[in-house]
Amino acid sequence: MTPYVSDSLSDSASDPDRLLALGWGADLGAAFEPYRAESIVPARVTRVDRGRLLVMTAAGPAVALPIPGLSSDSRDAACTGDWVVLRRTPDGPSFVDAVLPRRTLLTRAVAGGESHAQPLAANADAIALVEGLDPTPSLSRIERLLVLLWETGATPLIVLTKADLVPDPWAIAEDIAGIAAGAEVHVVSSATGDGFEGLAHHVGFGRTLALLGRSGAGKSSLTNRLTGAELEVQSIRGDGRGRHTTVRRELVSVPGGGAVLDTPGLRSAGLWSAEEGVERVFGDIEALTSECRFTDCGHGSEPGCAVQAALAEGRLEDRRWENYRKLQREAEWMASRTDARLRQERLKSWKQMHMDMRRNPKPGR
């Protein structure tokens, strides 16, 4: 067995059930059918590691080379959690020929202002935003990450860790539940095991729970508790910032079936295609804007502004309003960048088509 694949993952089920335990189903079987041939098998990506993929097949773990010509940051490139079409060769490495349709996908905008999305995790049934209770988490950061999660198609959760380190974790949880936009809020302690029973149904047979959060939030400790693995963990620094322990996105099996997808600490989370997520997380503000006297209200000094009235009466926090405006502007800016990129790609394709027609005129012309 390759040393790069978790022992717990390779031993989690008998060979016939191995892929079923990781979420293989009839929809994936139908998508794989056109590729079915000798030496072609389905597999799930468990880790992307320096230009190669670690995958799990029905026969066990394997190492494969990715689809050639695609950057690892490309939305079309295989990422951890993806189901892929694997071509095995008798004397050489295996190759990924295609990525099967994704049920869910977590992405973020590529750093540096480029107008494309970076895939972070695929085919998670639920994605947990993991926040440590010590130090007290930022509500604005939670709102930003919730916007990302509501865009994935997966069930969003909020998991508050390190409950044993604060005197009243439920008071903090109550504040966070007020901005959770319908997401479940769980309070847990990896040190004592308290609160984990509420997460059990999210990591059952055939289900995948992905973890997202900053360094030091307790994601690796959470993974260890849920899977029985022994991922390295470290305490946060004295300034309250986390140390990076997990350096790659990795799929780790749960005894009895299911998997946890652990991710490195997230330094930045640029929004990508986030208009619906912003509307979902800030539904209360969206409702207020519809109550303004004028449909083109700028929510400043206009008479009859429902937003300004709510701010003045304390029904809407200044912090939440400013964060909404910030994320809304960011989502609109990224949407405009994306539209511009698509226009450029269509124009490039149109020019190439006409150049080809000029080089290769039809007979008789």
Image (cartoon, rainbow, N blue to C red):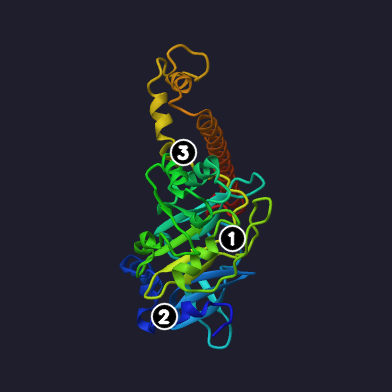
Name the mark on residue 278.
Answer: 3
Residue 81 seen? no
Per the image, label 2 sits on a secondary structure element best described as loop
Q: Which marked residue is nearer to the observer: mark 3 or mark 1? A: 1
Q: Nearer the viewer, mark 2 or mark 3?
A: 3
Q: Which amino acid type is marked by label 3?
A: Val
User: In the drawing, what numbered circle is on residue 58?
Assistant: 2
Task: Identify whether 264 is placed above or below 205.
Answer: above
Give the residue at mark 1.
264
> Which image quarter holds the N terminus?
bottom right
Which residue is the extreme one toward the front? 167
In the displayed orientation, state which residue is furthest to the left: 26
How dense is the environment of label 2, judged by Cα within 10 Å: few (below 14), some, or many (20 and up)? some
Query: Is residue 66 left or right of 258 when viewed as pictured?
Result: right
Q: Residues within 10 Å of mark 1 (few under 14, many from 20)?
A: many
Instruction: Classify residue 39 by image quadrant.
Output: bottom left
Task: Looking at the picture, tell me which residue is in the foreground, 211 or 135.
Answer: 135
Q: What's the distance in space between the residues labelled 3 and 1, CA to CA?
A: 24 Å
Judge whether 218 appears above or below 351 on screen: below
Towards the viewer: 341 or 112:
112
N-term-proximal mark, 1 vs 2: 2
**Given the image, on which type of amino acid does mark 2 rest?**
Ala
Amino acid carrying mark 1 in the image: Pro
- Comparing 41 with 169, the one in front is 169
Please tell me which residue is depicted at 51% across the width and 47% down the height of the picture. Answer: 145
* Label 3 element class: helix
Residue 62 at least partly seen:
yes
Q: Position of residue 139 (x, y in %)?
A: 52, 41
